[in-house]
Every structure is written in C-alpha cells, then in structure tokens.
Image (cartoon, helix red, strand yellow):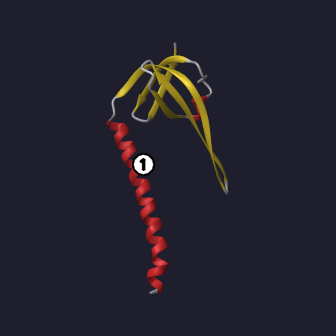
C-alpha cells in the first residue's frame, strides 16, 4: 500500500515532464514545417520575463509585431537582437511559425 502511495508523486512528475517534452518537440516540429515568411510589420511592444532560480535568473525577451492587416504576433527574441528593436520601428519581419528569424528596419 505504501509503495503505491510513494510511487504516485514520481509517476505524476514523470507524466508532467513527458507532456512538457512532447509539447516542446511538437512546437519545434510545427515550426520546422511552417513556411518562412517575410512581411511588413511594426514593433508595437517589447517585454521581458524573468524567471528566478536558486542559482540565478533567466530572462526571456519578447516583441509584439503588428501587421498591416492589424493582426499582432508576439515572438521570443534572442538576447543579442532585442536591443536593435525599438517600439514604433517599421520594417520587414522574417519568421517561421513561432520562431523569430530577423527584422530589417525600413
């Protein structure tokens, strides 16, 4: 009886890790099979998300782009490129699925 009760948290943790890995791999695969698009867009917002850990913090950077149609898309931006984006910038956004590939200001 105690063996089953002790095993439940481990089974649940294994299932959660499995689901997270499945979601990450599915998104990666979907991005790989998405067309590579370059469209006119405006940078309308930037934000950061800081996740604190015992051994430090991890910061992720995001930018929201608005297309001429009025639709918006938020993409994760590499740390070495976020400084080049300024709200209000207009240019050509290149992306593939949820993957930011570049932004060239016009």
Please, which residue is most extreme toward the bottom here?
A: 1
Q: Is residue 83 left or right of residue 12?
A: right
Q: Looking at the picture, how far across and down is residue 87, in whole percent? A: 60, 22
Q: Is residue 106 left or right of residue 24?
A: right
- How dense is the environment of label 1, judged by Cα within 10 Å: few (below 14), some, or many (20 and up)? few
Q: Is residue 86 above or below residue 24?
A: above
Please, which residue is most extreme toward the top here?
A: 106
Answer with the quarter of the image where residue 85 lies: top right
The one of 10 and 88 positioned closer to us in this rendering: 88
Q: Is residue 18 above or below residue 77?
A: below
Q: Residue at x 43, y 70 (%)?
A: 11
Please, which residue is most extreme toward the front here?
A: 70
Q: Looking at the picture, how far across and down is residue 67, in whole percent? A: 45, 21
The one of 104 and 19 positioned closer to us in this rendering: 19
Check disc 1 and report the residue beneath it: 24
Q: Residue at x 45, y 60 (%)?
A: 17
Q: Is residue 53 above or below residue 9?
A: above
Q: Looking at the picture, how far across and down is residue 83, in whole percent? A: 62, 27
Viewport quadrant of the N terminus: bottom left
Q: Looking at the picture, how far across and down is residue 50, in whole percent? A: 63, 44
Q: Residue at x 44, y 54 (%)?
A: 20
Q: How many marks?
A: 1
Q: Is residue 89 above or below residue 56?
A: above
Looking at the rendered structure, the secondary structure element under dot 1 is: helix
Q: Residue at x 59, y 30 (%)?
A: 46
Q: Is residue 30 left or right of residue 14?
A: left
């Amino acid at each position: 009886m105690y063996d089953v009760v002790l095993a439940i948290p481990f089974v649940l943790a294994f299932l959660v890790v499995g689901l997270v890995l499945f979601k990450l791999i599915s998104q990666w695969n979907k991005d790989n099979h998405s067309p590579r698009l370059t469209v006119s867009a405006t940078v309308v917002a930037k934000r950061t998300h800081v996740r604190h850990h015992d051994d430090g913090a991890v910061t992720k950077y995001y930018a929201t782009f608005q297309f001429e149609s009025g639709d918006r898309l938020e993409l994760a931006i590499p740390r070495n490129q976020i400084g080049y984006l300024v709200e209000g910038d207009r240019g050509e956004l290149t992306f593939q699925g949820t993957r930011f590939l570049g932004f060239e200001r016009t």
